[in-house]
Each structure stands twice: as structure tokens, then as C-alpha cells.
Amino acid sequence: MKRSRIPLLAVFPVTVITGVIVAPLILGNHPVRWTAGSAMPHVVVGDAHAGPKPTVEAAGKDAKPPAGSGTGTGTQPPPAAPATVANPWKPGMPQWGVQIYWEDTPEQSASYLTEKAQLQAKYLIGLKANSVSISFPFYTGNVTSTKTTAGPRTPSPERLETVLKVFQEAGLRTTVRPLMDEKSLGGMPNWRGTIKPSDKDAWFASYTKFLGPYLDVAEKHKVASFTLATELNSLEGDPRWKALADTAEKSYSGEIGYDANYDNYVAGRINMPVEQLGVDAYFPVKVPDTAPVEDLVKGWNVWLDKKSRGPLPEIVISEAGIGAMTGAYQEPGDFHTKRALNTQVQANWYNAVCQVVKQRKMKGVYWWSIYFDDDPFAKPADSASRLHFAGRPDTEKAIRDCFGSDYALTGSTPTS
């Protein structure tokens, strides 16, 4: 039987405010990138008509930091055997997870991959997570390129298998998530959401060919979800996606998804023939660092209400995060800036997002992110991105409280 897709993801009544439709599409208010900055709208809590304002240029969330700028200097010996999830995910339960970003180094041995994946699995289980998403880069040329390819940091399908086995042996729900690298696009205003292939037939043929071996691996290992694409604003709604999804379904029987950038999500329908819609959610909220969690919750709901009020049971937050620093609420996707450390800002944001996910009865949340090669048990080095949460006790407690609640086990009793 053919699996049921969300029909063009036109699931919710749209109550979009006109100013919010136009501005994000022009400004491209995605999280700021390693290669360049972006213009992100700022919203005053309670003011649904607040217009977009420019923001500073900063680094991208999905680029590998310079050598030596990982989460810490300490090392955690890999466990002899991976721990297992106490309450494994089952259909109907929320997905409580983390995005693992993996830029592969082919010279690293299979045993290294196994040990590192065991280390990450042990950490995620300690957070009471039941899910993990493996994001990894693939490459293109400039914004008009018609080709997509594996590159020097793209894990091979065989090496992906090694890592998947460890996470699945630990009882974690798994998602495979290719993510277009942006380094070749030349900087703002170009990013993955603005690509314009000169020959779309050729681009889709190339992308279908690239995805094929990874879909085969996902099927072999019964991966729960495969994210077909992420943040490709300019290609959303293209009729060629249906043929690509049909091809994917011939080799992969799991759930096929698409992760939208938050600007396009609130601006209108996301026309993609998939079963799960994720949102990379970096909603700026204009409140002071001293704002209570309830004000942050209100700020998120101001954004979400532009799309639809009430429960959002078909939506998963595919990325959420914020820097542990002063002033971060107004630019939660700012990866590069290092203002004064403020771990409570980050912890409060995580608590607020968790409340929103529960109140709106969403399918779950994935925190951005942990780099695969980093030691999540180490205290973040000062040179590390403020966006890192691993090794920050206040934020880790917020995650454990969220993932370990009664609602986290059933999804049936939302709490605030």
C-alpha cells in the first residue's frame, strides 16, 4: 500500500499577516551563516505587526568551526558498550532529539566512528533523548549550478551505516538528513534557500542520483525518517519534487520529510509532497536578557500564530537553539558572535521552546547541535560557538527536564 503523504502540507488554516508574507521572502530571514549574515525580522512580543529589521552579519550554524574550537579540551573515554534508551520512541510519542552534525574525515577508522558514536549515544541517553538526526553536508557549485555531489566531508553510505548501527543499538530513533553546504555559493545574499539552477531537470536528476545510496542505507537499517531536503526556499513547490519523492519511495519505506526555514513556514503553505514537515525555528523575540520564560513562550506563539493558532500535531521542530550569551533572544540563530557568556539566557530559551512544543502538541524537537567529532561531556572552550549546549549544565538540565517529563513519554498530557 502506498504510504499517505501530507497533501502539499496544506494542513492548517492560514492567518498570515500581509507584512509577514512579503518581508521574509525578500530578506531571507534564515539563521545567520558562517559565510555571511542575513536580514532577520525582529518581533516585539505581542505585536504581530512588527516589521523586519536588519541584523548584523555573522557566521553560519552548519559550518565546521576552525580547528581547535570544539566543545572543550577534555576527553571522555568511550564507553565499553553503548547504554540503551530507557523509554524507546514508539509511534504516537514525541521525538525528543538532537541534531548531530557530521563532517566526515575519511582517514578516520571504522573503530573511531564506532567509539565516537557510542560516546554521542551515551550523552544523548543521559539527556533522556529518544531520537537523533544525523545531518551531513553535500555540495553544489554556485547558485545556478545544476549538480549536487558528495564532497570531501560527506560520509560515504558505508560509513553512515557504521554510525547508524551504534545509534540504533542504543535504542535511538534515527533520522538521516543531508544538508546542502553553502561555502561555494559566494555569501549573502546567496544561501541554500536562494539557489536557482539554470536547468532544474538536470538539478533534480543529479540530486536524485546523489540521494539514492543513502536511501538504500536508510531502508537497510530501518531508519525512521529521511529528510529529503532542508531550507531550499526557492525550490519549494516545484512539481519535480513529486517524481523525486516517488523514486525515493521505491527504495525506502520509512517516513519522508522536509525541513522548512521558519521564514517560509510562517509566510504560507510549504508545498512539498512529504509525510513529515520540520521547521528550523530561529524566531527572534525582542525581550531583555532578564525576561522570564513565559515571555519567551509568548514571543514564540506570536510567530506561530501568524501561520495557525492552536495545536500543530503534524509539525516537528527540526532545529532549535540559541547562543548562551547576552542579547541572544533577538538573534537566536547567530552562530559566530561571542558576546558575554550568559548560560541562563540559553537555558530559559530551551525551557520556553519545550513548553511551546508541549502546549502546541507538536511531534517533538531536535536541538542544534553537537558536532560528531566533539566531546559532549567536556566544558565548552571559550573559542567554541556560544550556540553549543553540550557541557553547559543549566541547558542540559532544561533538556533533561523536558525530555524526562510525563508528557515526554506519551504526548497525551501537555504541560506548561
Image (tube, rainbow, N blue to C red):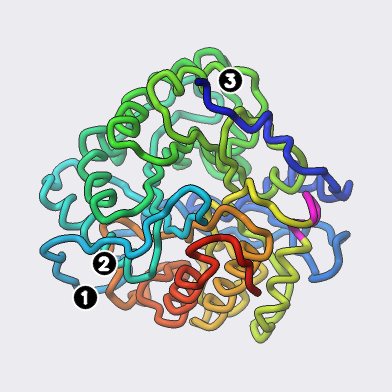
Q: Identify the secondary structure beneath mark 1.
A: loop
Q: What distance separates the C-alpha of mark 3 from that of mark 1?
A: 47 Å
Q: What distance separates the C-alpha of mark 2 from that of mark 3?
A: 40 Å
Q: Identify the secondary structure beneath mark 3.
A: helix
Q: Is residue 112 above or below residue 387?
A: above
Q: Residues within 10 Å of mark 2 (few under 14, many from 20)?
A: many
306 is within the stretch colored magenta: yes
Circles 2, 3 touching at the beta carbon (< 8 Å): no
Residue found at x 37% / y 28%:
215
The circle drawn on residue 242 is 3
- What amino acid is labelled 1 in the image? Gly
Q: Point out the stretch of residues depicted in magenta.
A: 303-309
Residue found at x 34% / y 57%:
371
Question: N-terminal of the two: label 2 or label 1?
Answer: 1
Q: Identify the secondary structure beneath mark 2.
A: loop
Q: Is residue 113 above or below residue 329?
A: above
Q: What distance separates the C-alpha of mark 2 from that of mark 1?
A: 7 Å
> Can see residue 120?
no
The circle drawn on residue 74 is 1
Q: Quadrant of the C terminus?
A: bottom right
Circles 2, 1 touching at the beta carbon (< 8 Å): yes
> Would you say 412 lies left or right of 222 here?
right
Indicate the quadrant where residue 293 lies.
Answer: bottom right
Residue found at x 53% / y 75%:
346
Q: Where is residue 123? Give x, y as percent.
A: 30, 67
Question: Which one is nearer the viewer's eye here, 330 or 406?
Answer: 406
Indicate the quadrant where residue 360 lies.
Answer: bottom right
Question: Which one is nearer the viewer's eye here, 194 or 320?
Answer: 320
Q: Residues within 10 Å of mark 3 (few under 14, many from 20)?
A: some
- What amino acid is labelled 3 in the image? Lys
Q: Which residue is mark 2?
A: 375
